[in-house]
Amino acid sequence: MLIRILTGAVGIPLAVILIFVPHGLPFAVAMGAISVAGVMEFYRGVRKIGARPVEWAGLLAVLFFVFSARTFRYSDGTTIGAIFPTALTLLLILSFCVEMIRSERSPIVNVGTTVFGAIYVGWLISHLVVLRGVWLEGLTVAPKVVQIGQFKPEVGACLVMMTFLCTWACDTSAYFFGRAFGKTKIAPKLSPNKTIEGSIAGLVGTVVVAMLAGWVIHLPWYHTLAMGVVFGVLSQLGDLSESSIKRELKIKDFGTIVPGHGGILDRFDSLLFTGPAAYYYTVLFLQHWPK
């Protein structure tokens, strides 16, 4: 427990700094490093069940997803509309080509794990980078900002910070409340320690933090409520999805790089789902915020 708290005490301030540095390049670099470490953990894990992913192709795809997301702007859909699908197609074909020259072929398993790992880690994380670069209402000269006293952070930074805070709130609320009061198992075969009581607490904690964060950045209450509910549900689904992968691989954690939490994927599994949700909610509903 102490190690988990100390890790959070170091990691949270670092995340805040990276998120709010103007123009988001340090954040994109950090997400690139996390994506590489995460996909390497995934490929190392699937090797335990006999898969032989084309790791170098998957790593290149992950890096491409994350750093090409830096060029995307809200008013221009060409990156999402053309470049990303092109990269996925090339990754699939390249992986097949490599598999065909191997002496022992298993294309369904090997190509499948290569592409799945790149999508699961790199493609999903890249949404956080795109979200960080969101410039609402088609502004292309300078990013739009949110007025918080004398502080004027960029819109994208505020949305990313809100996503991180809500995801952390869900994880923390569910963990502590579930340990103290949880009795009814929610998915005993996937994650024996998770309970319905903890899940409800996670959802409530997420909504509360979302409402507070929305109030700070002047986001209308109905948007913060909706985002809180979405984050509270998807955060837990992301956690359970990663647990299902680990059960198939018969491993407890993907790694030990994050003290007290396991590997990169063990720490960022929920953000893999909440990040895309935050981005698409922004695209669909927040075009005219802030006023």
Image (cartoon, rainbow, N blue to C red):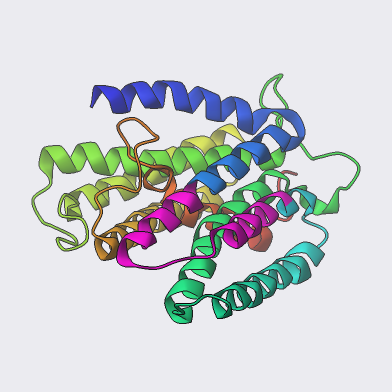
Q: Which part of the image, by quadrant, shows the C terminus?
A: top right
Q: Quadrant of residue 97?
A: bottom right
Residue 53: x and y in percent read 48, 65
Q: Is residue 230 left or right of residue 32?
A: left
| Span shown in magenta | 38-67
Residue 140: x and y in percent read 88, 47
**Tally of marks:** 0
Q: Nearer the viewer, residue 250 or 83?
A: 250
Q: Residue at x 40, y 46 (%)?
A: 207
Q: Nearer the viewer, residue 37 or 17?
A: 37
Q: Is residue 187 magenta?
A: no
Q: Is residue 193 above or below residue 168?
A: below
Residue 229: x and y in percent read 42, 55
Q: Is residue 268 above or below residue 282?
A: above
Q: Residue at x 39, y 68 (%)?
A: 51
Residue 211 showing in the rendered view = no
Q: Quadrant of residue 61?
A: bottom right
- What is the chief secondary structure element of the magenta stretch? helix
Q: Is residue 186 left or right of residue 214?
A: left
Q: Is residue 41 magenta?
A: yes
Residue 31 showing in the rendered view = yes
